[in-house]
Amino acid sequence: MTDPDPFRVIFVCTGNICRSPMAEVVLRALSAQRGLGARVISRSAGTGDWHVGERADGRTLDALSRRGLDGSTHRAKQFSAASFAENDLIVALDRTHERILRAWARSEDDEGKVTLLRAYDPHASSMDVPDPYYAGPAMFDSVLGMIETATRGLFAQLEPAVRASHRRLA
């Protein structure tokens, strides 16, 4: 019997150099820490093409590094129609991204994959993760904290199903 396909998550923000790369790295680290690194695929993309091929913003990399996380291999990508089929869950970083993704969805199944990251944080005062691009390092740290909290909530919901699908084959 072969292993089931890994669960594939893509995080989406505007340019794929600040918020979504943070979430991608955080989910990857959580999955690895819990022994599910091969069972959960974490990716990210932007709604726009401004930064395609670029590394994450230096302030993003610095904020991740301060938490012991490495985002150095990230290269910005743009979300495409194929991204719906290539992922099981599409996580928007704010309501603007959510609206764009729902508008791009070609089916109810595609639209049903779209969710907001902060929906997984029961204490969130807003559903939007603010864009730190025009702010300083402290804002990047604050945004990373929001992303870490919500991503832990997301992972807590994914983990039982991912473990169950893995155990069925063991």
Image: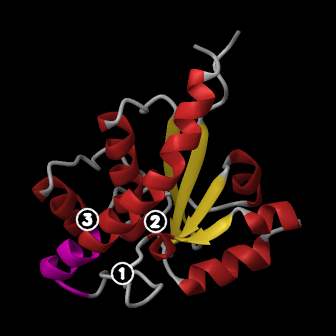
**Image height check: is 59 above or below 40?**
below
* In front of the other: 67 or 157: 157
Extreme residue in the right direction: 107
The mark nearer the N terminus, 1 or 2, is: 2
- Give the Cα separation between the discs numbered 2 and 3: 11 Å
Is 149 positioned to the left or the right of 53 in the image? Answer: left
Magenta residue check for 139 = yes
The mark nearer the N terminus, 2 or 3, is: 2
**Image height check: is 34 above or below 20?**
above
Circle on res. 16: 2
| Amino acid type, residue under disc 1 in the picture | His
Q: Position of residue 84 (x, y in %)?
A: 73, 56
Magenta residue check for 140 = yes
- Give the Cα separation between the discs numbered 1 and 2: 25 Å
Q: Residues within 10 Å of mark 3 (few under 14, many from 20)?
A: many
Q: Secondary structure at mark 1?
A: loop
Residue that mark 3 sits on: 60
Q: Residues within 10 Å of mark 1 (few under 14, many from 20)?
A: few
